Image (spheres, rainbow, N blue to C red):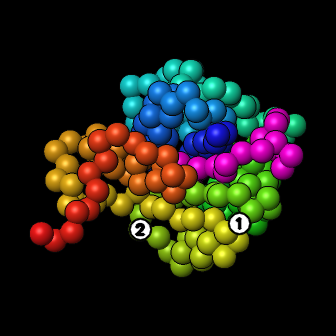
């Protein structure tokens, strides 16, 4: 399976990094990474990672300026794309088909080919324009999956919360992540 991972310039890059870590352990999944310049900056601000170390987790890395990359074409078959985190600027570009960079172009291609696009928006609070963008993206076929923690799993660390969100996003592609505590009902 080929999966595109897009990191845009919003807080929450740790979700994308953790997703790449999990997927790097899977030989049956080929990851294609594209990062915005703001995502690269946020990696340094929010984590102890370096952008090149994040890139090393992916099978293929694409320059966000390279509109001629493989992931810019619908003939390059993928299972879809996860934009994690997704800034409102990137979401606006996706919704309005304003593909002035590879991340947005790849998401646009995934939508036009009717493949799965999962958007993990990272903004709070939201105004009506943000909500409208998510609504429109959903109408176009995207799945909106905010990083909302579940507390029934009784997380003990921030990593537990991050892992739960990553596992739930991967569930949308039928990718199982070890350690996910699933709801067992009210017993």
Q: Which mark is residue 125?
A: 2
Q: Nearer the viewer, residue 118 or 170?
A: 170
Q: Is residue 42 left or right of residue 135?
A: left
Q: Which stretch is magenta? A: 69-87
Q: Is label 2 or label 1 in front? A: 1
Q: Residue 25 appears at what percent x and percent y?
A: 47, 27
Residue 75, magenta (yes or no) = yes
Residue 86, magenta (yes or no) = yes
Q: Nearer the viewer, residue 17 or 114?
A: 114
Q: Mark 1: few, some, or many residues within 10 Å (few <14, many ≥20)?
A: many
The residue that appears at 68% across and 28% down in the rendered structure is: 61
The residue that appears at 59% across and 50% down in the rendered structure is: 83
Q: Is residue 159 left or right of residue 58?
A: left
Q: Residue 32 appears at what percent x and percent y?
A: 66, 35
Q: Secondary structure at mark 1?
A: helix
Read off the residue under disc 1: 95
Q: Is residue 94 visible?
A: yes
The residue that appears at 45% across and 61% down in the rendered structure is: 146
Seen as rendered, the residue at the extreme left is 187
Q: Mark 2: few, some, or many residues within 10 Å (few <14, many ≥20)?
A: few
Q: Residue 19 appears at what percent x and percent y?
A: 47, 39
């Amino acid at each position: 399976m080929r999966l595109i991972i897009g990191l845009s310039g919003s807080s929450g890059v740790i979700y994308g990094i953790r997703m790449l870590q999990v997927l790097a352990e899977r030989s049956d999944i080929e990851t294609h990474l594209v990062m915005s310049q703001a995502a690269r900056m946020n990696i340094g601000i929010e984590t102890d990672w370096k952008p090149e170390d994040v890139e090393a987790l992916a099978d293929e890395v694409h320059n966000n300026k390279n509109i001629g990359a493989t992931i810019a074409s619908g003939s390059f078959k993928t299972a879809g794309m996860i934009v994690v985190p997704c800034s409102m600027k990137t979401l606006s570009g996706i919704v309005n088909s304003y593909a002035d960079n590879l991340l947005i172009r790849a998401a646009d291609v995934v939508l036009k080919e009717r493949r799965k696009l999962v958007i993990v928006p990272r903004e709070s609070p939201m105004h009506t324009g943000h909500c409208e963008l998510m609504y429109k993206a959903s109408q176009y076929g995207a799945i909106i999956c905010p990083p909302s923690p579940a507390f029934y799993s009784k997380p003990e660390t921030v990593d537990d919360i991050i892992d739960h969100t990553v596992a739930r996003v991967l569930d949308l592609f039928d990718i199982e992540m070890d350690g996910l505590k699933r709801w067992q009902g009210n017993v």
